[in-house]
Image: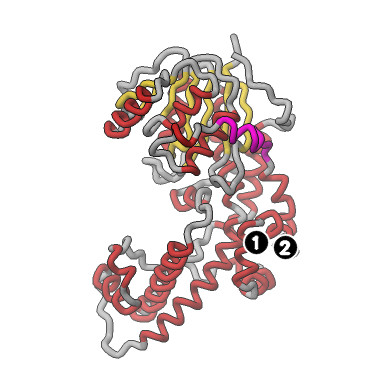
Amino acid sequence: MTLPPAASVHQSPVTFYNRWQAANDWLARHQPLWRPIPFMEPAPAWIRDYPELAGWLEALDDHACEYLEENLAELSQNVARFVPDLAGYPDLIAVPALATTEESRAAALAEVAAVDMPGRKREQAGAFSASVRPLTGPVLDWCCGKGHLARTLVGQGAPSVLGFEWNPELVADGNRLAQHYQDPVTLRHQDVMAETLTWPGKVHGVALHACGDLHRQLIRRGSAEQTPRLSFSPCCYHLTDHENYRLMSDQASQYTGAVTLDRNGLRLAVQETVTAPARVREQTRQISIWRLGFDALQRHLRSVDSYLPVPSHPGRLNAGDFRTFCAWAADKKRLELPENLDWQHWLAEGERRFQQVRRHELLRHLFRRPLELWLVFDYAVFLEEQGYRVRLGAFCERSLTPRNLLLDAVRVSD
């Protein structure tokens, strides 16, 4: 099997290991800027080391925050006035585009055939499919859901697709859709993490947004079976059974300066979403203010300046008020609230902290894509170690999905 034509894709001669090492060392140098979680730490140590940077960030108005959140390369150049090493951010995160917008749109399922398929998912599947053409053999769709990607791939030349999915209801619905549209797609109820899984011969394994250990299982199992080709877009790196992340490739694992990540570090890599509806954004803002107000209050009442984790709250509290939320949170943490509390004071403190957190998070968000690439470069090195030729790029624009990286690995003939 050969790689798809790549006339529009330029892969740098720098090796994936070189790029992983560069990302690793850059992240290691700047750990004080991205390790502290602003929601938990009102005064991270970097504020003392970079007081001018802290002052600049905290002086930003809401409009500037929104603009820079959408233009992180520009943010990096502003921050580089205080931390010069961040000027290299655009080059560090650069990856080629794997398909044009026109190719992606043409590859998407026709809307009339995209039953039960949200518009954004339809476009993502089209962009993914356009990026992995040509399709020359049978395909295995890993964690396939209802088989929307599988049916899209058939439209782009896949002769047949077998899908693995653990949810039997999705399997039944997907098979009905495939039969209705006469697509050569068969979905099978399968736990892909099961040791008893039987790999279906020489297939092209694909996965669009398989989460955490699920996509890592595809990489390990597919390469162990010497499958001819693996194409996948990873997602939700933090969904893993391990408390601390384990690098996959031998080269990265043996590097003495390798960054260590727990789940909080992994979460940062996926802490980006496309714009939510205004109602959802406002509700999220309100709850964040309440949680931060309660955090300030509990530090005061306990005389302990440390974060106290509060569990997810029931939806009914969204329609309540700050005092009701605090009563619920205090009950969960077995904390007694005095009768004479100045609720307006602590709500105002929550609002102040929310503005601060937003600006400190802006700095931290510069490290999301480098962390994600640190993970994905390691995947690429692992696949090269298993005998694959690998290309990496973006299969769609960030506005369609922030998780737009795609690894395409073709096994080199012996």
Marks 2 and 1 in Cβ contact (< 8 Å): yes
Residue occupying the point 59% across, 71% down: 62
User: In the image as oriented, which residue stretches furthest toward the front?
Assistant: 112
Secondary structure category for the residue under label 1: helix
Q: Is residue 16 above or below residue 139?
A: below
Depth check: 156 or 357 in front?
A: 156
Residue at screen point 69% across, 57% down: 76
**For the point 50% across and 49% down, which residue is it?**
270
Q: Which residue in the structure is indicated by mark 1?
A: 68
- Left-right relation of 236 to 413: left
Q: Does residue 254 appear in the picture of this structure?
A: no
Considering only order in the chain, which callout, 1 or 2, is on the residue closer to the N terminus?
A: 1
Q: Callout 2: 10 Å neighbours few (<14), some, many (20+)?
A: some
Q: Is residue 243 above or below residue 131?
A: below
Which residue sits at x=66%, y=56%? Answer: 71
Instruction: Measuring from the top left, give residue 149's x and y in whole percent.
Output: 46, 30
Image location (x, y in percent) of residue 273 = 51, 52
Residue that mark 2 sits on:
78
Q: Quadrant of the C terminus?
A: top right
Residue 172, given in percent of the width and then of the height, sits at 29, 29
Q: Is residue 141 left or right of residue 15?
A: left
68 to the left or right of 291: right
Callout 2: helix, strand or loop? helix
The Cα–Cα distance between marks 2 and 1, rounded to whole angstroms, is: 10 Å
Magenta range is: 95-107
Kind of residue at disc 1: Leu
Q: Position of residue 364 (x, y in %)?
A: 58, 59
Task: Choose between 382 and 192: the one closer to the eye.
Answer: 192
Residue at the limit of the structure toward the top, as seen here: 414
